[in-house]
Image: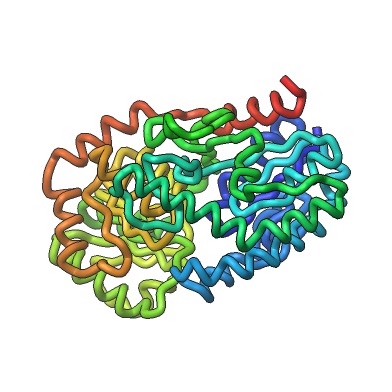
C-alpha cells in the first residue's frame, strides 16, 4: 500500500509521523512524505521519498515567537501551496494522513476517492466545553466561556481560511465548506495521545481511534560525556524547550541555573531552538543538543519543558515529575493536565518564568515524595504499542474496514 504522510509544523508534529512511517514501512507499505522543507535532511536519508510542502515552520516559529496571531495570515497562503504540492502525490497514493495545520488532504481524497485520516496529538483540538480553543491560554474557565472561545475560533478560521480553501475545492469540482475547522475534523481521526494522559472530551464529536502516542525508536546510547556527567553526582534535572525560541537566551540560561542552584539541583540543559546554554560556566551544568528522551528521561530527577505533546508523554512514560513552561497553543492544555494528574506542580507560563517560581517547582518535584511517587505509579499504566495501534487504524481505513 502507498501511503502519503503530510505533517505540517515543527519537529513535534513531524517526529510522531516519522515513528508511524517507520512502522508502516516495516509492515511492507511504501511511505512518501510531503512536509516542511527543513525536514528533508532528516527524512530523506532514512529512505523516504520527500516532497516539500512550502513553509519552513521552524524558521517561521523563530520569526514570530509566541505571537500566534502573526502566523495566521501566512498560513492562509500555505493552503494553496499544500494543494499544489500534494495534488500529484495524492494521485499516486492509496491513503493520505495529514496532521497539524493541514487542509488539502481531505479535499484531494474526496476528489480522488482516496481514504484520508487526520492525526491529532492533543485532544485540546476538539471543540468542547471542558477546555478552551488552542489559542486561549487560560485552562480553568467555566464551560460557557470555553464554548465562547470555540465560537471565536470557528469565526477566525472561517475568516482567514475558508475563502482560500473553497477556492481550491472549486478548482477540484468540489462543493464549498461552511465551517473550516469542522471540515478539518470531519475526517476519520487518529488521536495519537496516551489515554492515561487525556481522552477525547465526552461532549466532543470525536469519531476515530485513540491509539496512544507514536514514539520514535531511540536505541542509540547517550554518549560518554553525558554518561560521565550522570555518574558524577545525583540525578540532575533536564531543562529544554524544544522548538520554542527565546529573544534573550543568555538571560533565560542564567535564570534556569540560578533556580537550579537554589533548589540544590544539577542540570542537563538542552540548547534547543532557543540557543540556551551559551553563557553557562558551571560544573553542575551539562549542555546538550538533541538527545534520545527514552534513554535520558528515566535517569533524571525531573523534566522542565515547554509542554509539547511528545515531550509530555515521554516524561510521563519515564515516570519522572514534570515542570511545564507553556509558550503557546496546546502546551497550556498539557501543563494543566500534568497538574491535575499529580505528575508535576502548576505550570509556569513563559512570561511568568522566574528564579523563585522555577526553584519552588523543582523543590516540589524532587524535595517531596508525593509527585515522584505519583509519576512512577502513573507510568505503569501507559500504552506501549501506540505505533502498532496507529498502523492497524491506517490499514483498516485504507481497506475500508
Question: Is residue 283 in view from this perspective?
Answer: no
Q: Residue at x 32, y 59 (%)?
A: 325
Q: Residue at x 43, y 52 (%)?
A: 149
Q: Is residue 157 above or below residue 279?
A: above
Give the image location of residue 242, x and y in percent.
45, 60
In this picture, residue 251 sits left or right of residue 399: left
Give the image location of residue 189, x and y in percent.
60, 35
* Image quarter of residue 116: top right
Query: Colour scheme in the image?
Result: rainbow
In this picture, residue 216 sits left or right of residue 311: right
Q: Residue at x 21, y 62 (%)?
A: 358
Q: Residue at x 12, y 49 (%)?
A: 367
Q: Nearer the viewer, residue 32 or 169?
A: 169
Q: Nearer the viewer, residue 123 or 382?
A: 123
Q: Quadrant of the C terminus?
A: top right
Q: Quadrant of the N terminus?
A: top right
Count of number-bearing discs: 0
Q: Nearer the viewer, residue 19 or 75?
A: 75
Question: Is residue 172 in view from this perspective?
Answer: yes
Q: Nearer the viewer, residue 335 or 24?
A: 335
- In the rendered image, the residue lying farthest to the top is 401
In this picture, residue 351 sits left or right of residue 114: left
Give the image location of residue 76, x and y in percent.
66, 64
* Image quarter of residue 337: top left
Amino acid at each position: 500500500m502507498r501511503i502519503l504522510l503530510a505533517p505540517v509544523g515543527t519537529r513535534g508534529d513531524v517526529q510522531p509521523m516519522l515513528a508511524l512511517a517507520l512502522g508502516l514501512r516495516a509492515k511492507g507499505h511504501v511511505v512518501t512524505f510531503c512536509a516542511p522543507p527543513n525536514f528533508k535532511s532528516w527524512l530523506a536519508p532514512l529512505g523516504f521519498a520527500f516532497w516539500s510542502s512550502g513553509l519552513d515552520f521552524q524558521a517561521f516559529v523563530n520569526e514570530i515567537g509566541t505571537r500566534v496571531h502573526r502566523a495566521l495570515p501566512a498560513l492562509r497562503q500555505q493552503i494553496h501551496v499544500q494543494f499544489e504540492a500534494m495534488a500529484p502525490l495524492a494521485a499516486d497514493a492509496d491513503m493520505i494522513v495529514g496532521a497539524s495545520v493541514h487542509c488539502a488532504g481531505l479535499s484531494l481524497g474526496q476528489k480522488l476517492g482516496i481514504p484520508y485520516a487526520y492525526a491529532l496529538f492533543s485532544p485540546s483540538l476538539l471543540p468542547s466545553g471542558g477546555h478552551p480553543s488552542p489559542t486561549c491560554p487560560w485552562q480553568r474557565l467555566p464551560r460557557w466561556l470555553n464554548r465562547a472561545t470555540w465560537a471565536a475560533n470557528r469565526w477566525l478560521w472561517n475568516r482567514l481560511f475558508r475563502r482560500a480553501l473553497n477556492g481550491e475545492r472549486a478548482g477540484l469540482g468540489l462543493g464549498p465548506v461552511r465551517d473550516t475547522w469542522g471540515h478539518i475534523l470531519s475526517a476519520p481521526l487518529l488521536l495519537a495521545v496516551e489515554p492515561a494522559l487525556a481522552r477525547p472530551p465526552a461532549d466532543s464529536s470525536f469519531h476515530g481511534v485513540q491509539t496512544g502516542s507514536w514514539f520514535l525508536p531511540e536505541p542509540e546510547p547517550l554518549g560518554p560525556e553525558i554518561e560521565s556527567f550522570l555518574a558524577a553526582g545525583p540525578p540532575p534535572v533536564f531543562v529544554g524547550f524544544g522548538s520554542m525560541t527565546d529573544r534573550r537566551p543568555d538571560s533565560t540560561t542564567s535564570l534556569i541555573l540560578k533556580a537550579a542552584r537554589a533548589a540544590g539541583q544539577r542540570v542537563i540543559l538542552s540548547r534547543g531552538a532557543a540557543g540556551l546554554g551559551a553563557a553557562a560556566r558551571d560544573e553542575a551544568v551539562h549542555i546538550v543538543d538533541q538527545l534520545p528522551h527514552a534513554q535520558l528521561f528515566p535517569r533524571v530527577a525531573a523534566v522542565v519543558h515547554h509542554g509539547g505533546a511528545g515531550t509530555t508523554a515521554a516524561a510521563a512514560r519515564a515516570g519522572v515529575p514534570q515542570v511545564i513552561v507553556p509558550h503557546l497553543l496546546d502546551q497550556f492544555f498539557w501543563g494543566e493536565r500534568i497538574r491535575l494528574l499529580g505528575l508535576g506542580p502548576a505550570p509556569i507560563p513563559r512570561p511568568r518564568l522566574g528564579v523563585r517560581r522555577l526553584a519552588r517547582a523543582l523543590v516540589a518535584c524532587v524535595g517531596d515524595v508525593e509527585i515522584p511517587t505519583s509519576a512512577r505509579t502513573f507510568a505503569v499504566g501507559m500504552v506501549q504499542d501506540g505505533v502498532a495501534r496507529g498502523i492497524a487504524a491506517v490499514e483498516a481505513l485504507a481497506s475500508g474496514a
